[in-house]
Amino acid sequence: MNGQVVAFARSDSSLSVEAQKLATESRAQNTRVAYTLDWRSWEEHLREGDPRQAEDHDVANYVAALVAEGRAAATIRRRISGVRAGYRARGWPDPASRQTDAVLRGLARRGTDQRRAEPLTAELLLQIMESWPTRETDLDVRDRAVLLLGWQGALRRSEIVRLDWADVRTVSAGYLLTLRATKSGGDALDHPVIRAQRPNACPVRALNALRRRAQGAGLVVNGSAPVFTSSGRRAGRLSSARLAAAWVGRIVRKRAAAAGIPVDGLSAHSLRAGLLTSAGLAGVPLYRLLEHSRHARSDTLDGYIRGARRLAAHPAEGLL
């Protein structure tokens, strides 16, 4: 060491001061990314509403909406922290007050941290596809693409609705999707979507059909135009407005109910959970699932794998 004295950070005796600074900068960057995504989610919840006009009950209702989607309590608390930080950063009055605090206290008592979205497994997804309308409206075409793309890609609902046509690149196996501003704070990445064996469950076919329908409706299908759009004024038709994130869960529940599948516990996250659970049951290695799901930590993914294996190796199977 040549007589050099190395200073250590008080919070962790294993890190030098410089290492501690770098770690702090990393956490700060991840926090900024998370808060940015939290604010976008809040804006999507408000739809056309002005965040400056939001009131305490709006934030409280947002908490309830996140609970209905199956979000964990820790995630919900972080979301609200991000929203409040967004108001402070903009110099706007924070609308969250007594009503929001009361709802958050109720959330803590309920113990929602242990709640997980019910996975929409491959079997259930195929059940939905088998019951699909034979004569599809524009919204039927859109919803099929939402389900199949979200499921095979193990996409978060924010990743689904943020897709622009410029983010969809054709390759020999199907498509590469450019995913931006991921939850783990990483850079944009190319994410594969491949052809499926069953035509009615193929996300590549579904996305091709959506592109044709959008073109037929006179919508832009390139550049920054959104891939998934909301319904227009005419029933069953598409508009040019980006689909709100809250609608992904509604699409999942609507299409599951139409196929006779119980919707309790189903949410947008059921698509992501369904792919990971089904792949775990099929014996796909953990490292491949981790690469595909883009989880920052393997222990988060372990929960899906353990749950899938418990289902596959139940000790009572075949006894009755």
Image (spheres, rainbow, N blue to C red):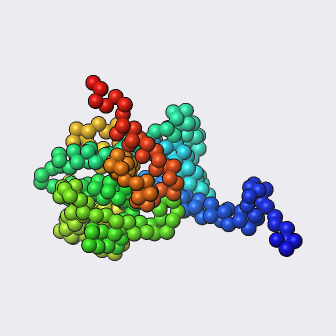
Horizontal side, residue 5 vs residue 21: left or right: right
63 and 197: which one is in front? 197
Vertical arrangement, residue 306 with respect to residue 17, above or below: above
The image position of residue 197, as x and y in percent, is 20, 58
Outermost residue toward the top? 320
88 and 282: which one is in front? 282
The image quadrant of residue 155 is bottom left
Vertical arrangement, residue 112 with respect to residue 239, above or below: above
The image quadrant of residue 10 is bottom right
Vertical arrangement, residue 225 with respect to residue 47, above or below: below
Horizontal side, residue 276 vs residue 205: left or right: right
The image quadrant of residue 308 is top left
Which quarter of the rendered picture does the N terminus lie within? bottom right
The image position of residue 67, as x and y in percent, is 45, 41
The residue at 32%/45% (across/down) is 120
Which quarter of the rendered picture does the C terminus lie within? top left
The residue at 61%/58% (across/down) is 88
The image position of residue 98, as x and y in percent, is 59, 40
The residue at 74%/55% (across/down) is 12
| Res 57 visible | no
Horizontal side, residue 186 vs residue 28: left or right: left
183 and 39: which one is in front? 183
The residue at 32%/57% (across/down) is 152
